[in-house]
Image (cartoon, rainbow, N blue to C red):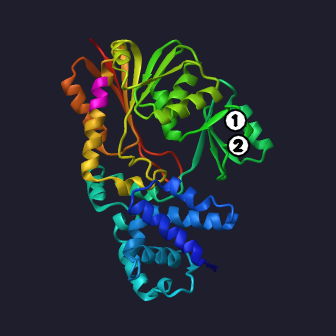
Amino acid sequence: MIKARWSHCNDIKSAIEEIMLQGNNTEITVKKYTSSSKKGAKDRRFIADAIYSIIKNYRFYEFICPTSNNPIIGIIAAYFYQNNILPPEQEDWNIIEATKIEELKKVALTMPEVKFSVPQWLHDLGIKSLPDNWINIIKASILKAPIFIRVNNLKTNFRKLSNYFNKNNIHHLVENEHCIRLLDRMNLSQNKAFSDGWFEIQDLGSQQIAHFCNPRPGDFVIDACCGAGGKTLHLADLMENSGTIMALDVNNKAQEALKQRAQRASISIINIADYSDKDRLNLLIHTAQIVLCDVPCSATGVMRREIDQKWKLTPDKLQSLIDLQYQILVQSSEWVIVDGFLVYATCSVLLVENKDQITRFLELNPNFIFVEEKTLYPTEDGHDGFYMCKMRRIQ
């Protein structure tokens, strides 16, 4: 049985407080507490595993935790108990009452919102919106997310990349000609094939959005919320690096990352613009064959990857997102040419961010018609959750 060191506990406690009480990002916080050269690989892994598990399963550990002067210590103690880890000998940490915890666990396992750790208001909304799917969605949300990579067909193909992985003992499974699943968790950022632009890390479900857009070489495409450009790069790949993609976002730092990624992938058709450049935006009216609106959302389809978002989300924040999504959709629709396509996408599973938005838009914009939609619910050992809808401008 592993025994936790007092120093481990202090790091884990500080990290949980920063994430849950101060709203800090989990990934950045984990790096902060595991980057010290004084920590060995086992120490770093122990601390990281504890932080990720506690944040992902926070409500469960909070429900079964023993009484403590510091609630966070109680939650960490519950995590130790659940994972057969001995706490340090200090009095603050020796607070486990096994009989009581086992009784609370029995209750927790009858309550999906506790067992799978989602806020009560979100669980109530999910059950109401998706009565047949919600439990499976939140069940998948506490599991480790599989790692998928997207093959950059401008530089290689899935056969060459698979052969390269075989030669370098990187265990993998070819999902299709565009996507490979990694079977071992590893950091590939320093890998030569990655540095040479052969692939990008991208979820299998996320990859379906660019295919859904169905761009052609020579098209003018606008990515209205490009972020760091995962889907922008994929669109460029499908366009065979021929045509033009206008990549828009409010996050200039993310756009800088896109520039670097595009250079690595040998993509030259992406132009980057800022939403503050009103004159340039006005020039986009009725110019694009395809406009993709991959809008900011609740991230309820990717909870196992963005593990702290469900705790930061509130009903008011969700409503603000819904308002912003519709605003982006309306503005972006102005850029579509007649017979061009407007594609709306989210990494949410909630109807209020997906189908309801499309219904509202089409009712108020008769110059667009519905073409098709696709909903991907997260699966236990597969893709994340996404929604995508294609509409065509008819006048």
Q: Quadrant of residue 310?
A: bottom left
Of residues 276 and 226, which is closer to you in this image?
276
Q: Quadrant of the N terminus?
A: bottom right
Q: Is residue 166 visible?
A: yes
Q: Quadrant of residue 176?
A: top right
Q: In the rendering, at what x and y percent does residue 285 appear?
A: 33, 14
Indicate the amino acid at tag 2. Gln
Magenta run includes residue 334: no
Labelled disc at residue 190: 2
Which stretch is magenta? Answer: 327-331
Identify the residue at horizontal 49%, vertical 20% (top origin): 245
376 lies left or right of 128 = right
Q: Quadrant of the C terminus?
A: top left
177 lies left or right of 90 = right
Indicate the amino acid at tag 1. Ser
Alpha carbon separation for disc pair 1 and 2: 7 Å
